[in-house]
Amino acid sequence: MGTSGKSWEKRLSGEVDELAVDFVESLSYDRRLYKYDIAGSIAHAEMLSERGLISRAEFREIRDGLFAISDEIASGKFKFDKIDEDIHMAVEAGLIAKIGDVGKKLHTGRSRNDQVATDLRLWMRDEIEVLQARLTGLQKAFVKLGGKYAGEVMPSYTHLQRAQPVSIGAYVLSFVEQFERDFVRLGNCRDLLNVSPLGSGAVAGSTLDLDRESVAKKLGFAAVSRNSIDAVSDRDFCAEFIFDCSLIATHLSRFAEDFIIYCSSEFSFITISDKYCTSSSMMPQKRNPDMLELIRGKTGSVYGSLMAMLTILKGQPSTYNRDLQEDKIHVFKAADVVSASVDMAAAIVSNTKFNVKRIADGMDEGFLDATALAEYLVKKGVAFRQGHGVVGSLVAMCEKEGKKLGDVDLEVFKETCDAIEEDVYDVLGGGAVAGQYATEGSGGLEQTAEQVEFWKHVLRER
Ligand code: ARG
């Protein structure tokens, strides 16, 4: 128990319980907002001077004091005291300690409620840009890998059953599409959050003649919030950001799952570098894709953050409540986990080889050419449903006789369907089909080459 010297607690008895001090503090995790807190304070103080609420000289003193504190925090010299609760009070207390009474003017027309809402938006704006750059790095790794194998063919799967042949490049580029949507989604999140809450005060604004537009402009916000009651408690951007992270984690997890399956001995489609594998403490032969498993496993924590964030929001009465302090734990956690996973995934992708010979050797298994044969029949004037049945019975026959479609004699083909001619053998064989796709965006060789060029161009510009 001690006595609090906090000005805003003059209203209270002054008694302090250590348990409560530890319970209420956010300084241990919100100190990472310090740069944004200081930037917000400098913009606010400058506006106060423009409006004559403090003098220009006082602004300069405040600004220089805040710069000095920023340097101290950056170099680890700043003394944090958990009694200050959060980064906002820590910086303000540090300022008053440094420049004296002038520092007490900084919080004019401001509350920690609009302050923290501002800080978190500023932080997230930057974080989104960094995360987008990481995503671009991952996309580039996929494009490089896809480009290398654009001319090679592999089976595509639906229901994890062999489906149709595709370019390996097309398969790899399918991930570039997913992360592109994540990139755009994050950009949308950034656009929507880029609004300044400063000037909303605790909930109702201020009786002082603050220039909200000026502060917003200094901080690079596109607009000022319209409604102070909403502005101090809006954390939609936090939920949205964590959702975006969750979807990135989903995409990463599915990629990891594929690569884990593909590097098993049963598949042996890919070899990932030893750098990203670990061995077993017991089984000497083991080479386990632990990094990929962790990427998949960490998805759980990101989803957990999303659930936590939504749950924090759901039962609160309007407007600011201290519950909201918990937002940062989950926002930071989701950002950190996803950032690390994106970088790890990029490194793995950059160090993965497709075992093209092994894949090619298996292309005749699983009747990958069956759909192309049905479409061949369409080109010969057979109704698709009828052709589908013809090929189905041919596949059943081949399966019984241990053959592939390409092994069937022309006479047998003709007995089943007389529209089949000598040229049927051009469309058969697992690999051949990949050269014959005609639709834009297909998994064909030509279309994949185009997609590789498209992505190289798009990502070069980023
Ligand atoms: N640390 C708090 C948070 O993160 C700052 C706002 C506190 N405001 C208040 N009225 N107690 O939400």
Image (tube, grey):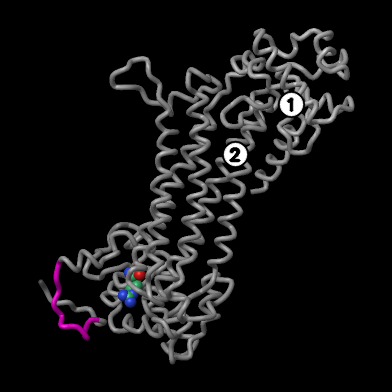
What is the x, y in percent for residue 32? 37, 59
Residue numbers of the magenta segment = 9-18
What is the x, y in percent for residue 410? 83, 9
The chief SS type of the magenta part is: loop
Q: Which residue is found at the position 55% from the left and 71% from the top?
A: 221
- Position of residue 115 in the picture relative to residue 348 (left or right): left
Element on which disc 2 rests = helix
Q: Which residue is found at the position 61% from the left and 47% from the top?
A: 180
Q: Which residue is found at the position 47% from the left and 76% from the top?
A: 231
In terms of image quarters, where does ligand 1 lie?
bottom left
Write down the quadrant of residue 415 in the picture.
top right
Q: Which residue is found at the position 19% from the left and 78% from the top?
A: 5
What is the x, y in percent for residue 127? 48, 56
Residue 425: within the magenta? no
State the residue position of label 1: 371
335 or 410: nearer the viewer: 410
Q: Residues within 10 Å of mark 2 (few under 14, many from 20)?
A: some
State the residue position of label 2: 175
| Mark nearer the N terminus (1 vs 2) | 2
What's the amino acid at mark 2? Answer: Phe
Identify whether 423 is placed above or below 6. Answer: above
